[in-house]
Image (cartoon, rainbow, N blue to C red):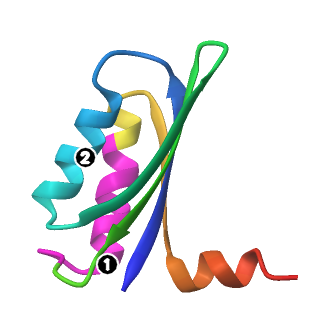
Amino acid sequence: MRAVISVVGKDGVGILANVSNKCAEAKANVVDVSQTIMDDMFVMIMLVEVDQLATEFTMFVDDMEAFGKSKGLDIHVMHEDIFKSMHTI
């Protein structure tokens, strides 16, 4: 099972490292990353495997969102199936 994580916020040093470390702590394996800087805004999409999570998926979602708020970032985690359903015409 995989999830899509989106991260948006003011650009700064260590955002990718911080979010990746938070995923590693939860045993979410990062399998793909796309990031860019738009003016002074950092924008990233990560695809992570969540089969081996150290916690329940809903707790992972809440933890990542709270972590984002503590860092001044907007972080959203969505199960891949929901993401695909939302983007199918």
In primary-sequence order, the first of circles 1 and 2 is 2
Judging from the image, what secondary structure is the residue with disc 1 in?
helix
Q: Amino acid at mark 1?
A: Phe
Seen at 40% across and 58% down, the residue is 32
Q: Which residue is mark 2?
A: 20
Residue 61 vertical position relative to residue 70 in the rendered view, above or below: below
- Horizontal side of 40 relative to 13 (left or right) equals right
Q: Amino acid at mark 2?
A: Ser
- The image quadrant where one finds the C terminus is bottom right
Seen at 51% across and 38% down, the residue is 35
**Structural crowding at the residue carrying mark 1, measured as other residues with C-alpha within 10 Å and reported as few (<14), some (14–19) or many (≥20):** some
Q: Closest to the observer: 28 or 72?
A: 28
Q: Disc 1 versus disc 2: distance between alpha carbons?
A: 17 Å
Residue 57 on the magenta segment = yes
Q: Position of residue 41 (x, y in %)?
A: 59, 22
Residue 56 vertical position relative to residue 36 in the rendered view, above or below: below
Q: Closest to the observer: 76 or 23?
A: 23
Res. 57 mark = 1
In magenta, the rendered stretch is 53-67
- Horizontal side of 28 relative to 36 (left or right) equals left
Judging from the image, what secondary structure is the residue with disc 2 in?
helix
Q: Residue furthest right?
A: 89
